[in-house]
Amino acid sequence: MSDAVLDKTSARDESTFDKGYLGAGHTLRSWLFTTDHKRIAILYTLTLTVFFFVGGIAIALVRIELVTPAQDFVSADEYNRLFTLHGIVMVWFFLVPSIPATFGNFLLPLMLGSRDLAFPRLNLFSWYLTVIGGAFTIYVLLAGGVDTGWTFYTPYSSIYSNSHVIAAATAVFVAGFGTIATGINFIVTIHTMRAPGLTWFRLPLFVWSMYTVSIVIVLATPVLAMTLTLMMAERFLGVPIFNASEGGDPLLFQHLFWFYSHPAVYIMILPAMGVVSEVIPCFARRRLFGYDFMVYALAAISLIGFFVWGHHMFVSGQSPYANLVFSFLSFIVAVPSAIKVFNWTATLYGGQISYEAPMLYAFGFVGLFTIGGLTGLFLASIPIDVQATDTYFVVAHFHYVMVGGTVSAFFAALHFWWPKITGRMYPETWARFAAVLMFFGFNFTFFPQFIMGWAGMPRRYGSYPPEFQVYHVLSSAGAAVLAIAYLLPFAYMIWSLRWGQRAPGNPWQATGLEWQTPSPPPKHNFDRVPTVEHGPYDYHHEGYVDQKEEIAGSMQTAQTDGDQE
């Protein structure tokens, strides 16, 4: 009799699973022409995963070269092309779109109580633009690469380089318009498609992060497009824009490029902050501390971020008075970031903390982002920046913020919403191990770079003095550990798709609207539009029973009933 009940329950579960968005048609055409935001998010995830591994392989070859002081694995020109490929791919084809294009696409309508984004076809078109930009990048790779560095600094990129600069710039140009399309879609959706009762200050912090980052994307990315267009015009048409020998100004390129590229730092980190703001309250079982201040901090970061680009140019020859202003503003922009770290810490205080994998990744984000932020204050100080410019200190700082922060948050989001996206649970023990391994592997890789950078080791060199070898060996060994930590989730997540335990609708007992749908969600998201009557993060200590304890209690009760029979 018990077996019959289980069979009926399993059949009912399978039926529910089949009605999800994943079961709405399995042909290639149904995926390539879908307008379902959830499927487009999956397409983005697969695309970005490919580029993550392309960029990872490029930097693995760089780290192999740096194990020894001599240039004995690849030539100097090949070395330049490898770290340039790594930078272009990781910045514009993974880090910038990583969270908005994947989790933002999947979750935003669910969190708002709507059935899709405002412009479903534009959403699909943005993915195609990303694929087209990626195709140009693959062409550059196969044709021999580009050697300008990911920043495309002129006049080398516009006059002297013999590599495939135009194709690489076109790749970034096209992908940028895909990002702009996503930003416009998110802004309109958040303004016009919120469920009844979901006022601005009832929005989850993840939605606020998508809103603020979309504004930055829409305002900043066109400047990058214009900058690359001017560079290509000088290279292809000979228009003297940045060539000083013909009356151009090479510093103009740096001002335009960094006017986009410093806000781009926040394009990468604001979504990560939104993810962590969802994960920490859930696994601390506490309402987020200082919700209003967290919203204002997101807005302040996105605004002030437009006024600090000049701190990348302290040694470029710009006015010392401009240096002073940019230094001051760079210290100011750290204040809202510090507010967020403080509020996350205050949320944890007195909470019923459980250490599931999403929480461990969130802890990793807070630790790595804090180190990256504090070292950013060093670089905001003009005398220190003069010493550290173009050294591995800058490399380490950048990676602590962008890679340590953004990738940690990406994996936190992946583990947190994986049951909702796929309807399957992953092996928790392996996930916890991967989270801890990634934190230690990352520090093992990049902390030695602070030391050798401060000692004067310049970046972008394939050969170096022997006294720096021990630090490079440590970094390369740490990179191997980090690679294992990145590959582990890839392996056990694929395993879970086939053999993972079926996920309930709300395995974490979280409070967001996205958890009020089945796992995975149906194609239409909601049978009827939900009504919101309270703010986000409505967690209470009273009456809360941990999910694992509840499951264990149910199993024990079932066993007792069986014994009595």
Image (cartoon, rainbow, N blue to C red):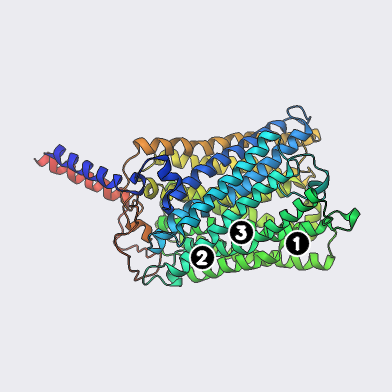
The quadrant in which the C terminus is found is top left
Residue 287 at x, y percent in the picture: 42, 65
Give the quadrant of residue 425.
top left
State if disc 3 and disc 2 touch (CB < 8 Å): no
State if disc 2 and disc 1 touch (CB < 8 Å).
no
The amino acid sitting under disc 3 is Tyr
Mark 2 and mark 3: Cα distance apart in space: 17 Å
Can I make out residue 270 in this image? no
Q: Residue at x 32, y 46 (%)?
A: 503
What is the CA distance from the residue labelled 3 to the residue labelled 1? 16 Å
Asked if the residue at tag 1 contacts the one at tag 3, i.e. Cβ–Cβ closer than 8 Å, the answer is no
The residue singled out by tag 1 in the image is: 310
Q: Earlier in the sequence, mark 1 or mark 2?
A: 2
Vertical placement of residue 303 versus 101, above or below: below
Q: Is residue 77 above or below residue 334?
A: above
- Tag 2 residue: 187
Which of pointers 3 and 1 lies earlier in the amino acid sequence? Answer: 3
Tell me the number on the disc at residue 266: 3
Residues 155 and 258: in front is 155
Q: Name the one closer to the observer, 466 or 483.
A: 483
Q: Residue at x 27, y 47 (%)?
A: 16
* Res. 260 visible in picture: yes
